[in-house]
Image (tube, rainbow, N blue to C red):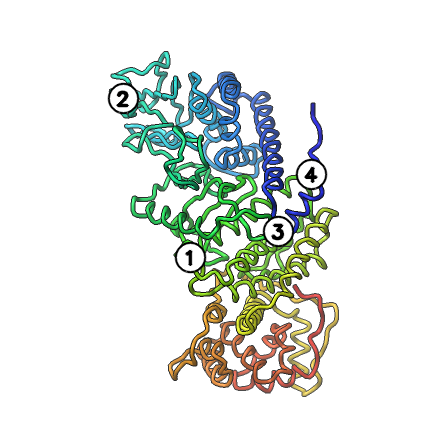
């Protein structure tokens, strides 16, 4: 009855190269289906062992509803169980049962199983009598929408009795704020023969598969992948649509969150952006950077106010995903369709790798955050590097395919972006190959990605774009090291003593730089200098900033401006990084300082910037100490 999942080698290699045919992605989806069913089985076993987990809800009435619905309409119910909403909820609930997550009352989290059953009954057209967990004045139906109850209850989380019959869901809410059964499952208080849900006396009656938005019903927004004329008659059927989910409580990556409905203007912007992104994405091949839009399940709009946490990436370009919700992604609305298309490719790469990691262990789960990731401001652990490398192979491939496509890329950003991302990704793949303890499948994956990127590195790119990309990559790495790393105290003391006495700079083999203690508490730093390399600019005038002077090629003037900035902002890594980059441009032999700029900072931090040139010339007399740095 139970056979192991065996992925054919050619399909693995397609995914390992950064791409994937329809057949390869379908295999990953089948693996996710198996995993989802196993997790659901684990939850049911827990509920059997400890029925009190559900509190006021009855486990015995939930599972038969799911079974009847699946027997009558297996495909819609399977799509429901594979949905991002069910995946995120199920993983969160199991983490709560294992004591590794927090949230609302446990019965309310676990009781979302009843909402899944009610949704299944609606999709299948079967009947049900169930108790659902209400959150304040709302009932969530995963993949369908949100019911708003007419009176706010006394308790934040409370049980609500509902009936499902022939695609209609009926709720009765008593004046006390608690809800009772609607009885036989037939509509009352006037019914809904017209097909439009609403409040009927003490009843809330909705037909979630067909009702438009109303005071009591908020359907999940849907973005058509195909023309609307081809849409099916009910939600979850017909040609594929991508959900724009702003209401499901489990749509975030962590704990449940409140609904945050986008307004009509914001919705219209998303619709336009998605349509424009589709015009960029439409293609069907297995190469890295390709994306078939119908493989995306859901987009969750993100707003800066959704989180008070400091972010390691710029809020304007934020996107994220989780292995618990295949094909789903949280996205801050970008400025245009090209940017959204790039984001969709990026996040779907994470989904593919997450599904592959559910099938194969790739590396030891080393969570020591000390490695350089060119697309982050903070140190990363090796599993994070693997995810980043896989995602940015897709991003590099995306820009490679846009080169020369002026319709999709009118500003001709693709050559620079391709040159930058292939260079940065290759650096991370080298770190993984030399630092990570990879399994057999992990070595095969890293080798596949490396083969793809090495092939791209041999492809010609406009010389100016390649040169600018190299400068941007070097600048980011230098500033990252100055912000996140420091020399060990013994090395710093020896360097200062040697410089003070005029001795040759010391070399301390085998010593690795240390992570700066404050780095974890710092907010994101914007690589403003690197962004200037994206678009070539004419030589700036007298009022230009140091960054503008450097990126325009005036290293002498830039160095003077950085020196002045370092005096005005003592301890700021940005002017020191810029000064080193300008110095290396003026004195090619000083480029060796860029490998370990924290050695320069260990000495220069104790002297006025006017002494930096002397320090650089002294330190450049010997190569950096070791190759053990992140």
Q: Nearer the viewer, residue 626 or 35?
A: 35
Q: Earlier in the sequence, mark 4 or mark 3?
A: 4
Q: Nearer the viewer, residue 540 or 544?
A: 540
Q: Earlier in the sequence, mark 2 or mark 4?
A: 4
Label disc, if present, on residue 513 of the rendered structure? none
Q: Secondary structure at mark 4?
A: loop
Place of residue 56 in the rendered image (x, y in percent of width and height, measured from the top left): 45, 21
- Label 2, residues with CA under 10 Å away: few <14, some 14-19, many ≥20: few
Viewer can see residue 131: yes
Q: Secondary structure at mark 2?
A: loop
Q: Is residue 251 above or below residue 76?
A: below
Q: Which residue is mark 1?
A: 316
* Distance CA(mark 4)–CA(mark 1): 38 Å
Q: Is residue 209 above or below residue 312?
A: above
Viewer can see residue 254: no
Horizontal placement of 198 versus 329: left or right?
A: left
Q: Which residue is mark 2?
A: 194
Q: Earlier in the sequence, mark 3 or mark 2?
A: 3
Q: Earlier in the sequence, mark 1 or mark 2?
A: 2
Q: Earlier in the sequence, mark 1 or mark 3?
A: 3
Residues tagged 1 and 3 counted as in contact (Cβ below 8 A): no
Q: Nearer the viewer, mark 1 or mark 3?
A: 3
Horizontal placement of 12 versus 399: left or right?
A: right
- Label 1, residues with CA under 10 Å away: few <14, some 14-19, many ≥20: some
State the image quarter where residue 541 is shown.
bottom left
Residues tagged 2 and 4 counted as in contact (Cβ below 8 A): no
Q: Which residue is mark 4?
A: 7
* Distance CA(mark 4)–CA(mark 3): 16 Å
Q: Which residue is mark 3?
A: 18
* Distance CA(mark 1)–CA(mark 2): 44 Å
């Amino acid at each position: 009855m139970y056979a192991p999942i065996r992925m054919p080698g050619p399909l693995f290699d397609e995914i390992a190269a950064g791409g994937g045919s329809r057949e390869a992605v379908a295999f990953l989806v089948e693996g996710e289906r198996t995993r989802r069913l196993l997790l659901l089985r684990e939850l049911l076993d827990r509920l059997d062992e400890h029925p009190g987990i559900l509190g006021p809800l009855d486990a015995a009435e939930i599972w038969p509803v799911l079974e009847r619905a699946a027997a009558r309409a297996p495909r819609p119910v399977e799509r429901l169980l594979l949905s991002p909403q069910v995946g995120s909820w199920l993983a969160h609930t199991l983490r709560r049962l294992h004591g590794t997550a927090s949230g609302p009352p446990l019965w309310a989290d676990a009781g979302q199983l009843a909402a899944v059953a009610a949704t299944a009954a609606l999709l299948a057209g079967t009947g049900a009598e169930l108790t659902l967990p209400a959150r304040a004045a709302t009932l969530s139906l995963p993949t369908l929408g949100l019911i708003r109850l007419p009176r706010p209850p006394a308790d934040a989380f409370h049980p609500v009795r509902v009936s499902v019959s022939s695609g209609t869901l009926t709720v009765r809410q008593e004046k006390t704020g608690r809800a009772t059964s609607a009885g036989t499952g037939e509509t009352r208080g006037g019914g809904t023969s017209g097909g439009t849900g609403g409040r009927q006396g003490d009843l809330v009656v909705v037909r979630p598969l067909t009702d438009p938005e109303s005071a009591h019903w908020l359907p999940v927004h849907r973005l058509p992948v195909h023309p609307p004329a081809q849409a099916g008659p009910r939600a979850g059927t017909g040609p594929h649509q991508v959900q724009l989910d702003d209401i499901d409580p489990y749509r975030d990556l962590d704990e449940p969150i409140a609904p945050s409905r986008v307004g009509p203007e914001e919705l219209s912007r998303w619709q336009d952006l998605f349509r424009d992104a589709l015009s960029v994405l439409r293609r069907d091949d297995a190469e890295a950077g390709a994306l078939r839009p119908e493989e995306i399940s859901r987009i969750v709009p993100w707003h800066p106010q959704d989180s008070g946490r400091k972010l390691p990436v710029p809020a304007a370009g934020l996107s994220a995903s989780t292995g618990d919700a295949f094909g789903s992604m949280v996205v801050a609305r970008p400025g245009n369709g090209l940017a959204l298309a790039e984001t969709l490719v990026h996040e779907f790469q994470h989904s593919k790798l997450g599904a592959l990691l559910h099938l194969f262990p790739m590396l030891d789960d080393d969570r020591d955050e000390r490695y350089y990731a060119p697309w982050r401001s903070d140190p990363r652990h090796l599993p994070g590097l693997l995810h980043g490398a896989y995602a940015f192979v897709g991003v590099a491939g995306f820009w490679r395919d846009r080169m020369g496509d002026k319709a999709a890329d009118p500003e001709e950003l693709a050559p620079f972006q391709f040159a930058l991302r292939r260079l940065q990704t290759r650096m991370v793949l080298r770190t993984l190959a030399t630092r990570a303890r990879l399994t057999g499948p992990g070595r095969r994956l890293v080798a596949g990605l490396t083969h793809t990127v090495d092939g791209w590195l041999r492809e010609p790119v406009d010389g100016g774009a390649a040169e600018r990309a190299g400068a941007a990559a070097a600048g980011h790495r230098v500033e990252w090291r100055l912000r996140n790393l420091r020399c060990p105290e013994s090395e710093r003391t020896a360097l200062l003593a040697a410089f003070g006495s005029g001795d040759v700079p010391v070399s301390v083999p085998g010593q690795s730089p240390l992570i700066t203690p404050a780095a974890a508490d710092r907010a994101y730093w914007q690589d403003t200098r690197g962004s200037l390399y994206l678009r070539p600019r004419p030589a700036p005038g007298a009022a230009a900033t140091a960054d503008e002077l450097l990126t325009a090629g005036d290293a002498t003037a830039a160095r003077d401006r950085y020196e002045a900035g370092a005096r005005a902002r003592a301890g700021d890594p940005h002017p020191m990084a810029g000064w080193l980059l300008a110095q290396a441009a003026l004195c090619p032999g000083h480029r060796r300082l860029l490998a370990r700029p924290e050695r320069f900072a260990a000495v220069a931090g104790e002297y006025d910037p006017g002494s930096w040139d002397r320090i650089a010339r002294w330190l450049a007399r010997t190569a950096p100490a070791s190759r053990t740095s992140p």
